[in-house]
Image: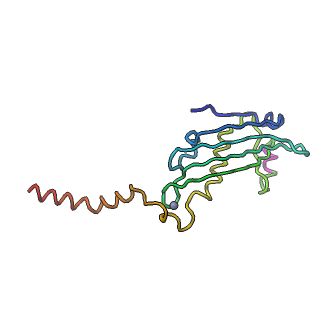
């Protein structure tokens, strides 16, 4: 397990902080429900900036690829992503409520311990809900059905007769 990367979000933004790193997909534990396997990694860049109205922003860029399980056919779906999110950093719950009704702004509450990996998982999960299946009609055409499914169907119908045949032979 790698250490979690935690920042003081206000200090980070006020100091125009910038941080880049690579994370193996394996370590993004909250994504595991969506994954076909643990292959791949992602690269992220987190930077902070203050605009001319003294508003504080976190800019998060995430690039990478991972193998999802298609939500329809459960086969492997290689998903590449290139996410860019701008988060307005607000200092109180009241400020958060103020921007809550504004769909054009994503805001988070400033905290002295912002878990960056957690934030990355969050952003990826948000992006997955619309893209975690093959395009319409593409599910079984270019991929074989999983061996597991075929095997189960065959063995369910064939097995009782096979047992019966063996039973007759031994008598
Ligand atoms: Zn599919």
Q: Is residue 61 left or right of residue 171?
A: right
Q: Quadrant of the N terminus?
A: top right
Q: Which residue corresponds to the image point at 77% horizontal and 57% vertical from the top-left?
A: 103
Residue 141 belongs to the span the image colors magenta: no
Above or below, comparing residue 8 to residue 55 in the picture:
above
Residue placed most toward the observer, 151 or 41 = 41
> Colour scheme of this structure image?
rainbow
Seen from the viewer's position, the closer of residues 170 and 21 is: 21
Q: Is residue 150 left or right of residue 142?
A: left
Q: At x 55% / y 61%, what residue is drawn? A: 134
Q: Is residue 130 left or right of residue 7?
A: left
Percent across and percent down for residue 79 are 59, 53
> Which residue in the rendered view is the most extreme toward the left?
171
Residue, far top: 3
Q: Please determine whether, in this image, residue 65 is positioned above or below residue 168.
A: above
Work out which quarter of the rendered image holds the C terminus and state it.
bottom left
Residue 32, how many percent across, how many down? 54, 46
Which residue in the rendered view is the most extreme toward the front?
A: 142
Location of residue 47 (image quadrant): top right
Q: Main secondary structure of the magenta part?
A: helix
Query: Residue reaching furthest right?
Result: 52
Measuring from the top left, give residue 89's x and y in whole percent.
79, 43
Please give the range of residues in magenta.
93-97
Is 147 left or right of 40, judged from the image as shown? left
Looking at the picture, how far across and down is residue 95, in whole percent? 82, 46
Please give the count of numbered marks on the rendered protein. Answer: 0
Please name the residue shown 72% across and 41% down the image: 45
Q: Quadrant of residue 77?
A: bottom right
Residue at image coords 55%, 41%: 26
């Amino acid at each position: 397990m790698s250490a979690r990367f935690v920042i003081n979000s206000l200090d980070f933004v006020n100091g125009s902080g910038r941080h880049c790193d690579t994370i193996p997909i394996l370590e993004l534990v909250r994504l595991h429900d969506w994954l076909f396997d643990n292959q791949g990694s992602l690269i992220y860049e987190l930077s902070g900036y203050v605009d001319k109205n003294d508003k504080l922003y976190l800019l998060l860029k995430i690039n990478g690829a991972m193998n999802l399980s298609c939500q329809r056919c459960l086969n492997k779906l290689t998903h590449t992503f290139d996410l860019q999110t701008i988060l307005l950093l607000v200092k109180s719950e009241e400020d958060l409520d103020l921007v809550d009704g504004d769909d054009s702004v994503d805001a988070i509450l400033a905290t002295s311990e912002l878990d960056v990996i957690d934030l990355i998982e969050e952003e990826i999960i948000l992006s997955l809900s619309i893209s975690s299946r093959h395009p319409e009609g593409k599910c079984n055409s270019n991929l074989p059905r999983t061996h597991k499914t075929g095997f189960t169907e065959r063995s369910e119908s064939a097995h009782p007769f096979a047992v019966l045949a063996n039973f007759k032979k031994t008598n």
